Amino acid sequence: MTRTITVGLDGSPASLAAADWAAREAQLRDLPLRLVTAWEWQAPAFAPATGLAVPVPPSDLRRASAQRLLAHARTRVGAARPGLRIDTDEISGLPVPALLKAAEAAELLALGSRGLSKTAGFLLGSVSHAVLASCERPVVLVRAAEHGEEAVLPEPSAREVAAVTDHREVVLGLELHRPDDAVIDFAFDAASRRGAPLRIIHGWTPSPYSYGGELMPDLREDMVQQVRRELCDLLRPWQERYSAVEVRAQATVGGAGRHLVDASHDAALVVVGRQIRRAAVGAHIGPVTQALLHHAVAPVAVISHD
């Protein structure tokens, strides 16, 4: 079964921006694009003060609205990329389980996002957070402000794409002591497909006895060189496999979150990992990813791993 690049739509500009981003990604990977939206049957609600039923839109109207949304998105995306196979699917059910189910057959799931501090739209805030925390496929969150809310422009030529992507690097936030092959490979593959440099940012904390670099400069420099050697050793197999990708490795003292957010302003994509935790409670995301979801400008790809 051929996997797809799947997009969850809710009609917001951010989710339409996610569809635009996913369409280009589908072409880069030579995969079909799948547009999905969830609608749910709602029982009549009752106003506490009166005990009277509060009208809700009939199910057929909600389904028709979902179909119109999919048709609009399909037309919008297809006009710019006429050769792209686009499938649509309206799913009856709650948004979070519907999107998690749709992601199972996907190469990756793209969602619109304005950051977790915003709550408007069912794919923004709590729903995107819940999907991200539970999904075991790669999830990419895209902001409308970065990719435009205006009409889709015609597909650029190969020369125009090269001119745009040459300076828009892919950024990888790398955990040196608990690296995961899937996260690293996703970032190298993304850079390779875009013809873009790969910037790798690793945050590390010196051991307590090395604090105060002015007192122990030789020891501190030794530690810096050791981290750089470990980075080179770790990345060597991928650099051999993706020999055309220009790699810029950066080791920073302290957490990587702030540096990744800063790098996102000039990036095509930021890639981070998320360790899968199957506990019943908890956010399951991690502080670096949380910081990116709040503040990153570029799309953020979160790759789940054991």
Image (cartoon, rainbow, N blue to C red):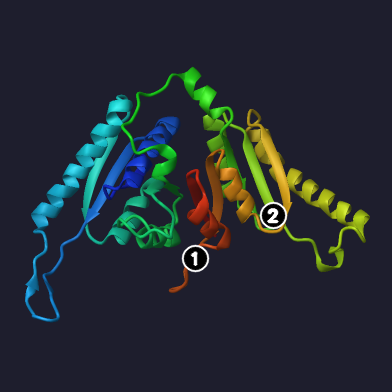
Find residue 71 and report its image quarter: top left
The mark found on residue 203 in the picture is 2
How crowded is the residue under tag 2: few (<14 C-alpha within 10 Å), some, or many (20+)?
some
Find residue 147 and report its image quarter: top left
Coordinates of residue 139 in the picture (x, y in percent): 44, 50
Residue that appears at 33% across and 35% down: 150
Coordinates of residue 28 in the picture (x, y in percent): 45, 31
How crowded is the residue under tag 1: few (<14 C-alpha within 10 Å), some, or many (20+)?
some
| Along the viewing direction, whichever of 51 and 286 lies nearer the viewer | 51
**Relative to residue 124, is residue 169 drawn left or right?**
right
| Along the viewing direction, whichever of 27 and 289 lies nearer the viewer | 289
Label located before the other in sequence (2 or 1): 2
Query: Type of residue at label 2?
Result: Gly
Residue 229, visible in the rendered structure: yes
Residue found farthest to the front: 49
| Along the viewing direction, whichever of 286 and 262 lies nearer the viewer | 262
Residue 3, visible in the rendered structure: no
Residue that appears at 24% across and 32% down: 75
Helix, strand, or loop for circle 1? Answer: loop
**Residue underneath mark 1:** 284
Query: Type of residue at label 1?
Result: His
**Relative to residue 3, is residue 167 drawn left or right?**
right
Query: What quarter of the picture does the C terminus occupy?
Result: bottom right
Find residue 263 and report its image quarter: top right
